[in-house]
Amino acid sequence: MGSDTRTVLVTGGCGFIGSHLVCSLVHRHPDWRIINLDNLDYCCSPRSLESVEDHHNYSLIRGDVCNLRLVSHIFDTEDIDVVFHLAAKTHVEESFVSPGSFQRVNVEGTRVVLRAARRAPRPPKRFIYVSTDEVYGDSLDQFPVIITRNNNVYGPRQYTEKVIPRFLSLLRADKKCTIHGTVPKSRHFLFVDDVIEAFLLVLEKGVAGEVYNIGNDFEIPIMQLARELVRMVKNIPESQLDDWLEFVPDRPQVDLRYPISSQKLQRLGWRAHVTWEEGIRQTVKWYEDNPGYWLEAGQNQGPISSTLDQ
Ligand SMILES: NC(=O)c1ccc[n+]([C@@H]2O[C@H](COP(=O)([O-])OP(=O)(O)OC[C@H]3O[C@@H](n4cnc5c(N)ncnc54)[C@H](O)[C@@H]3O)[C@@H](O)[C@H]2O)c1
């Protein structure tokens, strides 16, 4: 894409990755208009976007991506050039309890946004779908969709249900890190800034119709992750690290690891720049500096009610 002025719609822009993306876009491109469509689910904090909320080029629409009338209205009236679609239900454990809400937002919501985009008087030039799955069938050939699939992302402001902030919150409350099951699992972790760089690169240089993995070679067993965090936040001898680990029953289904290749993205010029040591240092520091962040958010937030309107 050229570097002309653009109107960008970010769905899920109040979430963890979305809020980092919105802040980058608003600050880097003061001549672009950034519209954030989000229903402010429980995992959002209004403080995540406080650095941009008064900027002239930023606006928030509080609404549901499953609401076709609303989403169509946005495409009909806002002349959207680029979509980053991140709105989703993302907590794996909750998906076992209420799969219907995941189906509704992740599948139906994606279908609604795609459908509204395709039918817009001037369809967007790029539709970047940030997900881990291809959920919307085979009708994308004539539409400039790019899919990204990333490894686990971590960094400041991630909601406390995800593993790194969960361990940090538990340790802060003097509770043990809960490790699911006894089968060793490991995860690749990417610092959120590197993921945002990948999105912006894909926007400029990505080829429509392609899928880009965003991953790195850094892989860490969950048990080692827990020990590292204990080491960082508790001032205790090595021999006592395991006293802060506790084994709990496993999830109904669990993946042992998710290795992916990012060669295609690297050919566009992307590299992860933030080392694990630096990223986890920044993350631990942020949670130490902002202990009440998610407690305060919980008192103010709640998704708006929505209808599947089509
Ligand atoms: N965080 C990771 O490690 C990771 C890894 C791989 C892929 N992803 C994908 O990246 C995307 C964003 O992840 P995240 O970690 O920022 O998630 P998140 O849970 O922090 O944010 C999701 C956002 O979507 C919004 N949302 C939920 N339902 C909505 C609805 N019906 N209408 C409008 N907004 C709605 C929420 O309010 C929230 O702001 C997701 O598609 C996720 O699957 C994340």
Image: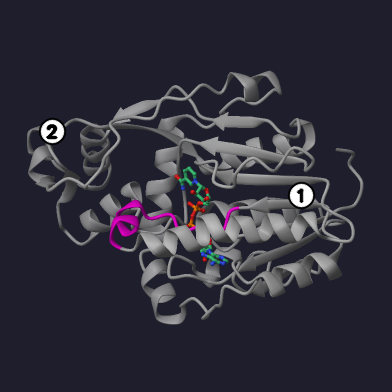
Q: Would residue 107 be found to the left or right of residue 265 on screen? A: left
The reply to whether residue 60 is in sight is no
- Residue that badge 1 annotates: 28
Image coordinates for residue 15, horizontal then vertical, percent: 53, 60
Q: Quadrant of residue 145?
A: top right
Labels 2 & 1 near each other (Cβ < 8 A): no
Seen from the viewer's position, the closer of residues 226 and 85 is 85
Whole-Å distance between the Cαs marked 2 and 1? 44 Å
**For the C terminus, which image quadrant?**
bottom right
The circle drawn on residue 238 is 2
Q: Residues within 10 Å of mark 2 (few under 14, many from 20)?
A: few
Q: Would you place residue 39 above or below residue 262 in this image?
A: below
Q: Which residues are magenta?
A: 86-97
Q: Which amino acid is tagged 2? A: Glu
Residue positioned 54% across, 51% down in the render: 17
Residue drawn 57% across the image and 73% down it = 308
Q: Secondary structure at mark 2?
A: helix
Left or right of residue 295: residue 26: right
Q: Which sits in the foreground, 72 or 81? A: 72
